[in-house]
Image (tube, grey):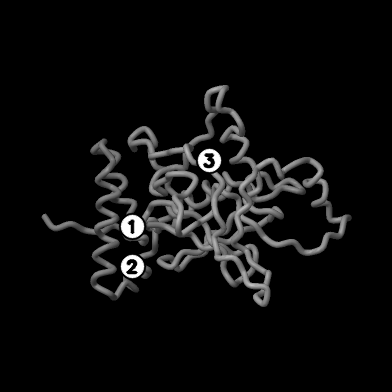
Amino acid sequence: MSKRVHFARTTTVFSEDESAVPSPSFSASSLSSSPGLLTPPLDDEESEETFTVVYPVTPFATQLQLDLLSPETPLPPKPMHIHFMLAFSPFDDPAMSWDISYPPPAPYLPPEDEQTIPLKQMLAEPATSPPLTLLTITHPSLKWKLDVEPKDPAPGAYVSVNDVFTTIFKELRIAIHPKDYAELTDVETRSAVDVAYYSRCGRIPDPKARSMEHHKGIKRIDMLMGRTKFLGLSGTRFGPESWELNTS
């Protein structure tokens, strides 16, 4: 019997049965290491504006700094930095090992003797410094932009590290429209998307759940053609709120 690719009738976010999917590989061993700059040092004559510098420390999110976000307090523009858990560096491994085909790792508390900064606290910190209320993520293989907003819409809320991880997973679980698949005119690209689709569904051990996932059709995650290892976000030229997702 020949294989067929299925498409959902509507563009809907489907939550994967976590009980039927193996846990993602996760490592926090490098969380305490200081990441390097994402870009080479700038010469004096070059522009100092950059949106890709990493801030390696986390205690910046103090109440004092959050108070400075008040609209009544005018502040001069600041260079935009990305949280080290989200930062992309071409020469270093990412702070977290995560296959974005699976849900992001849940917060946890390490042993007491290792609790310098618990992961739960780091995930709750702003994704950028200064904090943003909206962050847009793009990927070279995706035609869709991923808009990240605070989970809590209360006044003064900002996009957190966890908001970024959660949005990436949820947005990439949306089924694509058949016309998007029809636009894949390159034979090799379409074949790679098909392989990614069948491989993702095939990893589900439960036959019933696997069949259900097949019928949900190709999703945005399959458009990455198997390159689903999270490498981090890098800045773009489209503004401090625009970031590019790097995967391998």
At mark 3, the secondary structure is loop
Q: Position of residue 179 (x, y in %)?
A: 36, 70
Give the side of residue 96 with respect to residue 126, left or right: left
Given residues 96 and 100, the one toward you in this image is: 96
Q: Amino acid at mark 1?
A: Ile
Disc number at residue 70?
none
Reply above or below: 22 against 40. Answer: above
At mark 1, the secondary structure is loop
Given residues 118 and 11, the one toward you in this image is: 118
Reply above or below: 53 against 125. Answer: below
Give the side of residue 130 with respect to residue 179, left or right: right
Number of labels in the image equals 3
- Tell me the residue that label 2 is attached to: 181
Q: Position of residue 176 (x, y in %)?
A: 39, 61
Given residues 233 and 242, the one toward you in this image is: 233
Point out the residue furthest to the top here.
Answer: 112
Earlier-in-chain disc, 1 versus 3: 3
- Tell me the residue that label 3 is attached to: 31
- Tell me the residue that label 1 is attached to: 218
Residue pictured at 28% horizontal, 40% vertical: 204
Measured Cα–Cα span from mark 1 to mark 3: 34 Å
Q: Amino acid at mark 2?
A: Tyr
Point out the residue furthest to the left here.
Answer: 1
